[in-house]
Every structure is written in C-alpha cells, then in structure tokens.
Amino acid sequence: MKNKIAKVLPGGIGEELGFEEGDILLSINGTEVKDIIDYKFLLADDYVEVEILKPNEEIWEFEIEKEYGEDLGIEFEQAILDKAKSCTNKCMFCFIDQLPKGMRETLYFKDDDSRLSFLQGNFVTLTNMKDEDIDRIIKYRISPINVSVHTTNPELRVKMLKNRFAGNIYERLKKLAEAGITINAQIVTVPNVNNSKELKRTIEDLYKLYPSVQNVAAVPIGITKFREGLECVEIYNKETAKNEINIVKSLQTKYIKEIGTPFIRLSDEFYVIAEEEIPNAEFYEEYEQLEDGVGMIRLLRNTIATDINALSKGSGSFTMITGTSAFNEINKVCEIIKKKNSKIKMECYKIINEFFGETITVAGLLTGKDIINQLKGKIKTEFLIMSDNMFRKGYEMGSIEDKIMLDDLKVKDIENALGVKVIICNYTGEDLIQLINEHCKEE
C-alpha cells in the first residue's frame, strides 16, 4: 500500500515516537504525502505536524520539533511512494526495445520519472511530463536533474523519440535553467542522424544555458541483434568516431578557454573505436560522468599507477574478464600487476557478447551464460574478478552470492559452473589492488 512504512530505523525519530512497520503516513503539516518528493519537501522544517494511520485504523497525530532537514528515520515499501512513470517514447536507439523475449519482466519497464532522476540519477527525456510537473521540479528544487537531450532540433527530436511532444525540450531546459535548477545532459549519438553538425548545434545550444547545464556527455548508439521491426541505424566505425572526436575537440578547446572546463565530453567508446588516445586526468576533473562511460579508462590507468606500489608481495592467482572494448586496457593492467609481483598470476579473457550480438562490446551488458560458455574449462586460477557493473542495480543490499546478471544468473551459478571463487570489483585501480591484496597469501 502507498506510504506504508516498511522499516523503522533504530535511534530515529520514528522509533522514539512509536512508529511501527505497517503504519501508513497520511500527511505532513496537513498536506497529503503523494510521493517521496512531497515527503522530503514537507519534512524540511524544524517543526512539523505528522499524521499516522495505525493498522487498527486509529489515526495518531504528532507535533515534532527536530533539526532542520532531519528525517523521521523511516523507510517505505516503495522508494518513491508511488509507481514510477513509464516512458511513452519509441526512441530509435532505445535499448529496451532491442531486448529479446523471455527475460525478467522488470527489464522491459521504461522509466521516465523526474523523481528517479533526482533520487537515483536516472536520465529523463522530459517528454512524458506536463507543464505542472516542470513547475513542481522548480517549486521543490529537484536538483540536479539528469536529462536525455539527444538533440535540440525540435523536428529531429520528434523523429528520434517518435513523440510529437518531444520538440519543446529547449524551452523546458531554459525554464529550468532560469529557475536555477542544475542539469546534467546526455546525448546518444546516431551516425547520419544527430551527429556531426547536429551534434555541434545541440552542444552549442546547451552551452548557452551554462552554468545551469553543468556538463554534457555524448555516448554512441548501441544496437543488439534483436532489432526486428525497428528502423535501420548505423553504428560508429573508426572513421566516423574519429570525425566526431575532432568536431567536439574544437568546442572543448573553446570552452576550456572561456569557462575553464570542456563542458562536453565523449564516452571512452569513441576513443576506443577511433583508436585515439584518451584525454588526460585534468580533462575529466572529478570524473562526474563515469555512469556514462566517460573517463573510466583514464581513472583506471591513473589509480593503477598511483596504487601499484601498495601491491601485496604475497602470491595469488586471478582471472579478469571484460567486454571487447575494454579488453586491451584490462589486459595491460594484468601485465602491470605481474611485472610488479611475479608471484601473482594474472590472466585476462575477452568475453564476446553472443547473447545480444557482437556489436555490444561493453562489460556492463555481458551475461552469465556467455561468461560460462566461453570460460568453461579454461580458468586455472583461484579467483575470477568481475566488474560490479555486470550486475543489476537494486541488488546491492543482498549478499554477493545473490547478485544477479541480465540473464538472471547469480554469482553462485557462475562459481558452480566454473569452479572458481568470484570477486566483485568496481575496476578502479584502487579497488582492484585492494581486493588482490586481500586475497593474496603472504609468504
């Protein structure tokens, strides 16, 4: 049931006042709590009046004095106290539309909810929102908000998202920017659609909204082999990826001179496809766009270089796996570790994505079945190191053995099939070195 309390945290206000699991939050300061944004906004003051419905139908009223911004110390059955708003777009690059049949139901849900953007960092298109929803973002200061822009060309955006309401993106972004809402923008680029001159136009439009639009990340389209019934699109090759890098580089140079930051950054995939060197660490500043695959290679290189001297002097044996695009980089890391300590055995395997198709090259979209099929009988080490982005979000609170992959296989399934102990790592150099040290035997 909506607003039902699932957990009362020890030592919190709720426990002190006698809140219990199963209680229902009715209102704060006389206002009905519709969702998590209402809850956080209404609860901000240092004095609040709260109504709770108990399981026996009694309504308890509380007058609470607390610290400004202090929470009640309760968690709800549903994170946003409501059903997430689904997306009505039919984007030409949508990954969910390219999933095969028979996967778990939750994978087919397309969310486009500004509340999830605020709370979990999800990207939203703003096309599935009414004007009053935009006003609510401004009223409640929902910031930062992550927006999938793709293009600021109204006609092209309607075509790309297949939504007749998609063309007003720039007006909405401008309204949010003028209200002081911080915006992170994402562009999925499709060759011969919204790239090249169209990409330049979009970046320049967004730059006019700086500093409210803080940064922009551009990522290349990814397509699976399950595109039956969908329109034909091209993917990047060495030449087209290099062309995109050159177009964006001229803008980056200009923006660094004007505001001290590149403003627009391309995901690592562009540089890998183009066989171009990735930018230096200063270019990525605080690595705020890692979720878009921006700066991951540079961060790994730099942290390995910094932390390699902390590598254990003991012995151990490890296998690392990754997708096609990052294989060369991860293999270099293995060589660095072996060179530093010859008693540590490191192997690296490239996993071809046969489940979705070989055009999908990132580690985060690998499946357990492909890993098992391609590694069975090959692993000769004690441990298998897997990146945590191979596992689905929402399972972080469970045990390592219960972490689940896209095809529903769990860590324990992989361990049983391959006869190896799995270590989950975030693949930053610091985390990797630390985990290797923990599993080495001192001599």
Image (cartoon, rainbow, N blue to C red):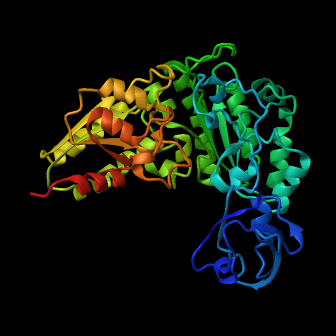
Which residue occupies 73% across, 62% down?
A: 4
Indicate left or right for 75 with 352 as reference: right
The percent coordinates of residue 277 (x first, y second) are 42, 34
Which residue occupies 82% across, 39% down?
A: 128
- Residue furthest front in the image: 56
Say whether residue 324 is visible: no
Asked where in the image residue 321 lies, by quadrant, the reply is: top left
Asked where in the image residue 193 lies, by quadrant, the reply is: top right
Relative to residue 301, is residue 418 depicted above or below?
above
**Which one is in front, 409 or 382?**
409
Indicate left or right for 236 with 343 as reference: right
Q: How many marks?
A: 0
Q: For the N terminus, give its image quadrant.
A: bottom right
Relative to residue 64, is residue 342 depicted above or below?
above
The percent coordinates of residue 341 (x first, y second) are 15, 48
Q: For the C terminus, give its image quadrant.
A: bottom left
The percent coordinates of residue 290 (x first, y second) are 52, 46
Which residue occupies 74% across, 53% down?
A: 115
Say whether residue 370 is visible: yes
Indicate left or right for 201 with 373 as reference: right
**Which one is in front, 257 or 306?**
306
The percent coordinates of residue 426 (x first, y second) are 41, 48
